[in-house]
Amino acid sequence: MRYTPDNITELALNEIFVFGSNEAGIMGAGAAKLAADKFGARAGVGVGLMGQSYAIPTKDLNIKTLPLNKIYSYIDDFIRFAERYPKMTYLVTKVGCGLAHFSVRDIAPAFRYIPANVILPKEFVEYNKNSQ
């Protein structure tokens, strides 16, 4: 089984860095800053594909944490996107488990049913495997 590396510093041409963002597209810290610095994320764009990155909002326009049902909706949008573009490999970070302060237990279930081209952090995979 392949897992998202803990420390992503470069991507292959067909890889996309999937990170937690905010709806305002402020890329000041965490994985969002890495996405902006290295993988083509753009300030002012808080959701979707940019360069070799894909933003999943976990915070709103005012940088307040979104409710889980809203985050799950954004994750569902991402999964549908990954299904439409199967030649790309999506390396999902621990979306929502950093600056948004959710636990793996809160977020991992949203990634239970994913296409083969979506790679998850080991913690998400283990949680989903052990909670079935």
Image (cartoon, rainbow, N blue to C red):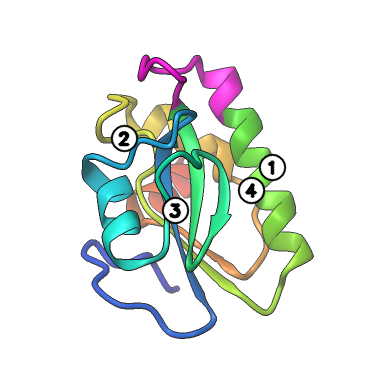
Q: Earlier in the sequence, mark 1 or mark 3?
A: 1
Which residue is at a point 24% across and 61% down the rendered structure image?
A: 6
Q: Which residue is mark 2?
A: 97
Circle 4 sits in a helix, a strand or a loop, which is it?
A: helix
Circle 2 sits in a helix, a strand or a loop, which is it?
A: loop
- Which x, y percent locates residue 32? 32, 47
Q: Earlier in the sequence, mark 2 or mark 1?
A: 1
Task: Find the distance from the CA under tag 2 to the CA under tag 1.
Answer: 19 Å
Circle 1 sits in a helix, a strand or a loop, which is it?
A: helix
Closer to the camera: disc 2 or disc 1?
Answer: 1
Q: Which residue is mark 1?
A: 77
Nearest the eye: 77 or 2? 77
Task: Find the distance from the CA under tag 4 to the CA under tag 3.
Answer: 17 Å
| Dominant secondary structure, magenta | loop
Closer to the camera: disc 4 or disc 3?
Answer: 4
Q: Is residue 122 highlighted in magenta?
A: no
Nearest the eye: 100 or 55? 55
Q: Earlier in the sequence, mark 4 or mark 3?
A: 4
Residue 92 figure quarter: bottom left
Say the numbered circle drawn on residue 78.
4
Q: Which residue is mark 3?
A: 125
Dot 4 alpha-carbon crowd within 10 angstroms: few under 14, some 14 to 19, many 20 or more: many
Which residue is at a point 69% across and 42% down the rendered structure image?
A: 77
**Left or right side of 2 for 110:** right
